[in-house]
Image (cartoon, rainbow, N blue to C red):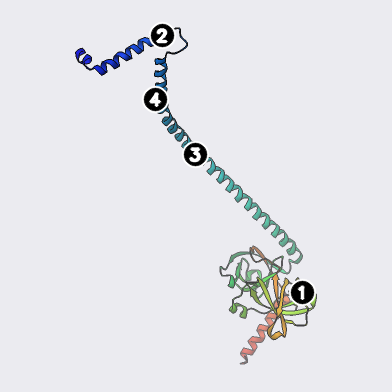
Amino acid sequence: MWFRLFSNRKLFILLTSLVLLLLLMGVTGNGRTELSWPEKAFKSTLAKLQGLVYKPAGAVTDFIDDLAHMGTLYEENTKLRAKLEKQIDVTDERDDLRARQKELEKLVGYYEKHKQEHIVAQVVARSADRFNDVIVIDRGMAEGIKPNMAVITHEGLIGRVESATDSMANVQLLTSSRQENLMKAPAIAAEIKERNAFGIIEGYDHDKKALILSMVDSQAKLHKGDTVITYGQSEIYPPNLLIGTVQEVGKGNYGLDQTAYVKPKASFDRLRYVMVVRDTGKLEVQKHLEENKADKRAKGGD
């Protein structure tokens, strides 16, 4: 075996050089502060080899640490976002409750002054079709509600009772513009308070977001901001109910009268509570008109 080892000259020279290097390091290493050039060369080579191995290993370790840190940050971000959304929801809920409280305070204040004349009801549903704008309230004939009663909020007139059952009633809003509803609905006689002028509310313009007040005397000098209220000779609406203010004035049919666009005073966006006006005088008028119609039909009239 030794013969084979010595026969390989290159291997023999390498082993001999390594042994001599180790012996030299051992002999010269004691009591010295400086390294010999073989030691320096050996340690430099070893350091470079360690660096080549350490850098990739360190990069992999840093990458794994970054992934773990990113996971922690994601969890913290998710928790913070959920907490923030919850705070936003709580804030929105508080704002909504405050708005409801203010609305109820105004409603209660108005109702206390007119409680003999009104029936307070809560809105429980609303039609999806705004051209047929109808709401459903939780009061009906059992509480004395009848068709064609005026319906208001503390801000002003919003419509009339279209139909009623014992416990529910449908209210057609002024913003309804479906022709068949307008033909069935009694006309709303209106007065422009500051000008001593009169007209008829005939519908709602969705583009202008205003009620259409027609048949106004062409000699009346209407101005933007004039107050429009219900007129006392209206068939079903009690007098002096606030409708809105004049927004725009134009010519009527053939220039013989004027048409005014009236911005409603009441808000129709988020109706929660309404009041049905209980006017005994108007109910008697309606009863009288219905009896007359029944008599004409019985006598064969039109």
Label 3: few (<14), some (14–19) or many (≥20) C-alpha neighbours in 10 Å? few
Disc 3 is placed on an element classified as helix
What distance separates the C-alpha of mark 3 from that of mark 2?
A: 53 Å
Residue labelled with disc 2: 28
Q: Of the residues shown, which amino acid type is indicated by label 2?
A: Thr
Q: Which residue bears the numbered disc 3? A: 70
Pick the quarter of the image with the C terminus: bottom right
Q: Secondary structure at mark 2?
A: helix
Q: Dot 4 lies on which element? A: helix
Which quadrant would residue 25 be assigned to in this image?
Answer: top left
User: Looking at the picture, how far across and down is residue 88, in whole percent?
Assistant: 61, 49
The residue sitting at the bottom extreme is 300
Q: Nearer the viewer, mark 2 or mark 4?
A: 2
How packed mark 1 is, by other alpha carbons closer than 10 Å (few <14, some 14-19, many 20 or more), is some
Label 1–label 4 contact, CB within 8 A: no
Q: Is residue 159 left or right of residue 226?
A: left
Q: Which residue is mark 4?
A: 49
Question: Which kind of residue does numbered mark 4 sit on?
Answer: Leu
In the image, residue 143 lies at what x, y percent?
65, 68
Q: Quadrant of residue 233?
A: bottom right
Viewer-nearest of discs 3 and 2: 2
The nearer-to-camera label among 1 and 4 is 4
Q: Earlier in the sequence, mark 2 or mark 4?
A: 2
Mark sitting on residue 223: 1
Foreground residue, 229 or 35? Answer: 35
Q: Residue at x 64, y 86 (%)?
A: 293
Distance (Cα) linking label 4 and label 3: 32 Å
Mark 1 to mark 4: distance in Å? 94 Å
Residue sitting at 73 percent across and 61 percent down? 106
Residue contact at pointers 2 and 4, CB within 8 angstroms: no
Does the image show residue 258? yes
